[in-house]
Amino acid sequence: MKKWFVSLLSFCILFMTYAPMSFATTMTTHDFRHSNYDTFYENLNGNWNFIRGELFDPQDMKEEIKLGNSDIVKVPYMLNQRLNIDSDRATYSTTIKVPESFVGRYLKFYIPFQYSSYNLYVNNVLIKENGSLLKSNKTAVQQMKPQIPGFLVDQTTLQITFQMISFENVSGGLRKSISIGNEQIIVKKQQQHEFWQVFLIGCITLTACISLLFYAFRRKQKEFLAYGMFCAATSLWGFFTDYYLYTAFLNQLDWSVALRLTFIMPQIVMLFYVGYVYKMFSEAVPKKFITFYNYIMIVIIFFTAFSSTVMYQKLFNIILIFMYVFYIFLLVSVIRKINWQDLTQVITLVGILLVFVGAIHDMIRVSAAGNSIHLTFIMLGIFISIQCILFCRKFALQWLQVEQLNKELISLNESLDEKIRIRTKQLEESNEKLRELALLDSLTGVFNRHYLSSSLEKLYKHYKDTKVPFAILILDVDEFKKYNDYYGHILGDQLLKNLVKILTDALPARAELTRYGGEEFVVLLDATTYSEAFDIAEYMRNAVEKAELEHLGRECKVVTISVGGVALTEAQFTNTTEFLKIADQQLYEAKNAGRNCVRVKNLH
């Protein structure tokens, strides 16, 4: 393990320090004579003449080249590309050849941010001063932002010369590729780059705000806080990468402060990034590891903020190498414990790997040669986008689940309402049956004496209010005791049931048949005159006689009934018991008259 780590470290150092140089006595040339002005856009990478330690104007640079005092380097090329060299100034020069048609037209350079102050000459004309080429770094001024200076082409061969001072910056020099092209194309590309940078920063900022608002309302979900802080730090870092948009708002910010921020911001981002990953995979990553990592990162941030410019820049790459060991351990821990059936965790792991690849790229390419965009920031943007998609998916699934639960709840409520309706109806029917059972005679099925009392009271009250006549008939089975003695009580009960059927068929619809007790029954007849009551009584008696129900216990050998009753037309009583007694007396008269006869009295 130790040998592997030493080999990796040695490879990284050799990669960063390797930069071929050669001796030159002629001016290097970039030939664009076959270009078209309308589509002209080329970078100036490749061989340049280079003299370290001196600032020469274009004419003097030509003389120095002729004398063989210049080297040829591959641009992009930093002043301190070799670790054994420590110089803060240099002159870069090359020539470009353009078609005759370019003469009299404007061209522009696109010069990305360089960690140096510089003067740019085209031939012998100074076209751009970026910062101040003073001898002392204490009074130096650097402008840490891209530049797009333009010039008028006056001949087909153009000498491009950069005088550069990096002061206390180990990354000084032509660190990033320079482009030249049609004025419109250069401006358009610059605007496109800045647009996508601003768009990405805006999206990340919006995500940070939304996440922090979620945390404000759901304090228990700490991952929203970790994610929001991570997004906010990434968004702020976006102003200090590649196009250095911070210069649009803080143009007067001291260059040394801005330079520190370009180193501090990614450190803060990685601090929050690891914290968020830990929140996502807390079971996979040891808490002690995260605590140790946080302490180390805080120390590094503190060191970057307060040490000298040269010190933190020289140690930055070495610190990065050791920090990536921690990131590898983090990755391995997550991969070992990840649930491969969980789509969210798998996609998050892909995002983590993308960020790791971008960080490795920046450590090797950007830190070494600078001729590359910051992939880490882009990969972080992709990672944040992935997390946004996962959050949206999670909330969409939760929302669908809530909708499904609501539908099920509504269905259950409807089902419950239907069950309640059915049960209520059943209960009402049961109650109705209970009421009926409470008012019906259990043997014969006709109304019982309790119903007779309440119904008779209502009938009499209606009679007093409306003067509509009504009648009461009381009937009794003749010599029913002899029937029970002869046939037994079981057949006696059956006889009563048979009589009820015969009587029910003989009675009109308005009549109510009730059992008064034993073998006695009472018939209530609403809106019935004396003559109608007598006819109904006679019809019942005759129906029973014609049925010829056997009664061998008496002389006539068949079952007969006696009927007594009263008809109220104008008479008044204090209570129903009085005229009920009169009806009962009429029944006794019918019995005394020899049975199987009718006696009805008209009360008027």
Image (cartoon, rainbow, N blue to C red):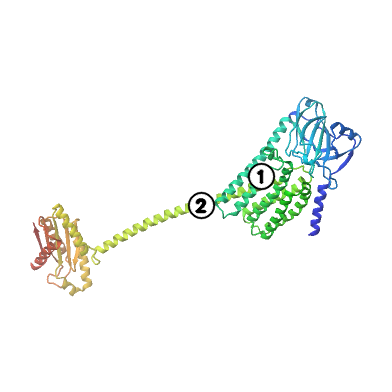
Q: How many marks?
A: 2
Whole-percent x and y of residue 278? 65, 56
Is residue 166 among the parts visible in the rendering?
no
| Crowd band around label 2 with a 10 angstrom C-alpha radius: few (<14), some (14–19), many (20+) | few
Label 2: which secondary element:
helix
**Above or below: residue 591 compared with residue 306:** below
498 relative to 413 in the view: left or right: left
What label sits on residue 236 in the rendered view? 1
**Viewer-nearest residue: 497 or 448:** 448
Q: Residues within 10 Å of mark 1 (few under 14, many from 20)?
A: some
Query: Is there a contact, CB below 8 Å, between mark 2 and mark 1?
Result: no
Q: Is residue 15 visible?
A: yes
**Coordinates of residue 466 in the picture (x, y in percent):** 15, 52
Residue that badge 2 annotates: 402
Q: Residue furthest top?
A: 104
The picture places residue 544, in percent across and down from the top left corner, at 16, 64
